[in-house]
Image (cartoon, rainbow, N blue to C red):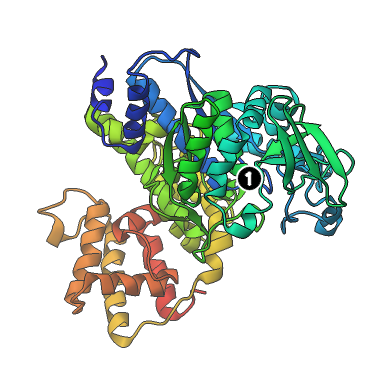
Amino acid sequence: MSRLRDAAQSSKAWPFEEARKLVARYKGKVPEKGYVLFETGYGPSGLPHIGTFGEVARTTMIRRAFEELCDIPTRLICFSDDVDGMRKVPDNVPDPVALREHLQKPLTSVPDPFGKYESFGHHNNAMLRRFLDTFGFQYEFISATEFYKSGQFDEILLRAAERYDALMKVMLASLREERQQTYSIFLPIHPETGRVLYVPMKHVDGEKGEITFDDEDGREWTLPVTGGNVKLQWKPDFGARWAALDVDFEMYGKDHSTNTPIYDRICEILGGKKPEHFVYELFLDENGEKISKSKGNGLTIDEWLTYASTESLSYYMYLKPKTAKRLSWDVIPKAVDEYHQQLRAYPDQTPEQQAANPVWHIHGGDVPASGMVVSFSLLLNLVSVARADDKATLWGFIRAYAPEAAPETHPDLDQAAGFAVRYFKDFVAPNLSYRAPSEAERAALEDLAAKLRGIAADGQVPAEYAAEFSALSEEVFMSVVRDTGKAHGFSSLRDWFKVLYEVLLGAEQGPRWGSFIALYGVAETVALIEKGLAGELR
């Protein structure tokens, strides 16, 4: 057993904790079907959002942890419920009015408003697969339309007809009395209109596998439950899918948690074994509201990837999955920098620490080295003071700071430099607000400029720091900044740093000043202070 596998056996990292439950499910032996099956479900009623990605990313992390713990083969299925009727027209599609006549039709029978695919369902499925492929996930895609029509679901549908009363008993117990009067686990698809009908059953023939019902015009119909003529209501569909595929693991959001006993019981009535579950907290937009596919609020995959790497998003998904998370622009820089901090820490960690490090779970153990010799947050500050319009401008400063770095040898840094320029223009620049210093603050800033001007002139460590430092470094610059603040009566260095941020950067917070001066340059920092004192920063 490898040292990391040994460490994983007791690791408290949540993917390993969940994976150990799956190992115990089969006592470490290969199940009859020959593999352990992970599943994620997707409702393609709107464009995929980051919450959808999060399910696949986190499930993949548990799958990787399971594969580290044992040698049982695994599969991951991404299942799209594209037979679901379109209950409302999404807000974020072209010409939404044109879709109204297709309400209640299965999503794969609704025209694609983007005009690119066979249907709206096919379009959204393609978007799902595109972003899953972007992240390199290993998965198999199943469309509910094909699953229902091809016969793969027939055995379970026929069993559902046979055990209709038992299934209805479970469902009716969870419904209000008014809803009980019209509820059925089966939703017929009208042979003429193609709409998904929410109508009560007049009769369910378990022997023949047929249902009889009246449509909305009062006409009676009898249809087989097989061949794509019906779909299951979404709660029974959850459990029926588990039984049909013999699913071993599925995670879902907290909004599903109260339905877990229903899903499990449906699965068991249909002859399946309930899977292991993991319930995660919901994703919120910048206003604290739940993100929604139909509303299109919160960040999209493409929006995150416009400003940061795929790995930074995977890192954000790893963190505290049972805590509600905001998906807004301001979380991106922190996620990028923390991800690279973990990359730098990984090589020197013990196996136990590596097993708990998010980057192991993001990369499946094949952890790359970080080339970010400059943090993303510091790059944003550099864009601001250098007034950079492209990453080439930033590289002029980066090469002076780290001569060994180059776009060819540090591609992650090169990519981040481009992201920083975009992020600054779109989110930082519009909110910059410079202020003039008070008289006491002005005196402190003038003193700091004088000290840095002296360093720039002779390139030497100031005499008062020579005993501690043999060469100029970030620590020297930080000491100069810190001691200047103390000398001018700032009892809290936080207050002094805030003055520097607000006067020189137009923000309430910013970089570690020693690192900033080392990157931007001593003479350049002096010039920045002089502009701030002159009120020339805008």
**Residue flagged by tag 1: what amino acid is it?**
Pro
Residue at the image position 36 percent from the left and 82 percent from the top: 437
Q: In terms of depth relative to the viewer, which is nearer, 224 or 335? A: 224
Q: In terms of depth relative to the viewer, which is nearer, 205 or 296? A: 205
Q: Residue 67: which quarter of the image?
A: top left
Quarter holding the N terminus is top left
Mark 1 surroundings within 10 Å by alpha-carbon count, few (fewer than 14), some (14 through 19), many (20 or more): many
Element on which disc 1 rests: loop
Q: Residue 377: which quarter of the image?
A: bottom left
Task: Using the image, determine if residue 114 lies above or below residue 167.
Answer: below
Residue at the image position 67 percent from the left and 43 percent from the top: 44
Task: Return the x and y of residue 39 as percentages of the image width and height.
Answer: 53, 31
Q: Is residue 447 left or right of residue 231?
A: left
Q: In terms of depth relative to the viewer, which is nearer, 528 or 259? A: 259
Residue at the image position 67 percent from the left and 26 percent from the top: 158
Task: Using the image, determine if residue 298 lies above or below residue 403.
Answer: below
Viewer can see residue 400: yes
Task: Using the image, determine if residue 526 lies above or below residue 136.
Answer: below
Task: Return the x and y of residue 68 as percentages of the image width and height.
Answer: 35, 21
Q: Is residue 216 left or right of residue 124?
A: right
Q: Residue furthest bottom?
A: 439
Task: Return the x and y of residue 431 as percentages of the image width and height.
Answer: 52, 70
Task: Return the x and y of residue 364 as percentages of the image width and height.
Answer: 41, 27
Residue occupied by mark 1? 48
* Image mark count: 1
Q: In terms of depth relative to the viewer, which is nearer, 3 or 166? A: 166
Viewer can see residue 139: no
Q: Is residue 302 left or right of residue 410?
A: right
